[in-house]
Amino acid sequence: MGLKKFTVPLTDSDFLDVKLKVEKNIVVDFSLNYRAKICESFFEIYRVDTAHGFLHEQRFWITPEPIPVPSMERNLNYIFNFYLNQIKENFKRYKSYFEDRMKMR
């Protein structure tokens, strides 16, 4: 299947950018990047991916540094779907954390 890239609109100002590399119906690499338009500018808020050779997340309201995430013996198909759903369910909270940290409210 190869590499797929697409954007999932969450609201008019919140977007989830997806990059997904699949081989034989198995996820081998991915990135999920939640970004939001705040005060007419886009900001990265939260990201989870397999870049740099390991599974990690970046909580931009805390630090841009990658935070390793244990895979707990799960395959990347499971992990991708878990984080996809997590972001969809929690993006408003993440945005709130980011705005509070950056004093944008």
Image (cartoon, rainbow, N blue to C red):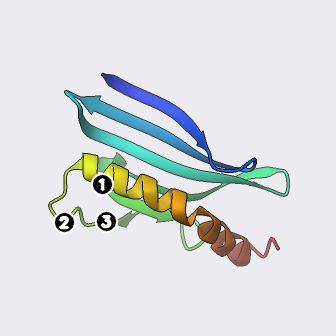
In this rendered view, identify the residue nearer to me: 92 or 100: 92
Q: Work out whether mark 1 precedes mark 2 in sequence or the reverse, and give the earlier one.
A: 2
**Relative depth, front residue between 83 and 100:** 83
Q: Amino acid type of disc 1?
A: Ile
81 over 69 or under it: above or below: above
Q: Residue at x 19, y 27 (%)?
A: 24
For marks 2 and 3, give the one nearer the viewer. Answer: 2
Find residue 79 and report its horizontal and vertical position in percent. 30, 54
- N-terminal of the pair, mark 1 or mark 3, is 3
Q: Quadrant of residue 39?
A: bottom right
**Which residue is found at the position 25% from the left and 39% from the top?**
28
Name the residue tied to disc 1. 79
Q: Quick one: label 1, few (<14), some, or many (20+) residues within 10 Å?
A: some
Q: Mark 1 or 3, which is nearer the eye?
A: 1
Say which quadrant the N terminus sits in: top left
Relative side of 5 to 102, left or right: left
Find disc 3 in the rendering and name its residue. 69
What residue sits 31% from the left and 40% below the top? 29
How many discs mark residues in the rendered view? Answer: 3
**Which secondary structure lies at badge 2?**
loop
Mark 1 → mark 3, Cα distance in angstroms: 10 Å
- In the picture, residue 61 is in which quadrant? bottom right
Q: Is residue 64 visible?
A: no
Q: Which residue is mark 2?
A: 72
What amino acid type is highlighted by mark number 3?
Answer: Val
Q: Position of residue 20 (x, y in %)?
A: 38, 36
Element type at mark 1 = helix
Q: Position of residue 68 (x, y in %)?
A: 32, 65
Residues under labels 1 and 2: Cα distance?
A: 10 Å
Check disc 2 and give the amino acid type.
Met
Q: Residue at x 31, y 65 (%)?
A: 69
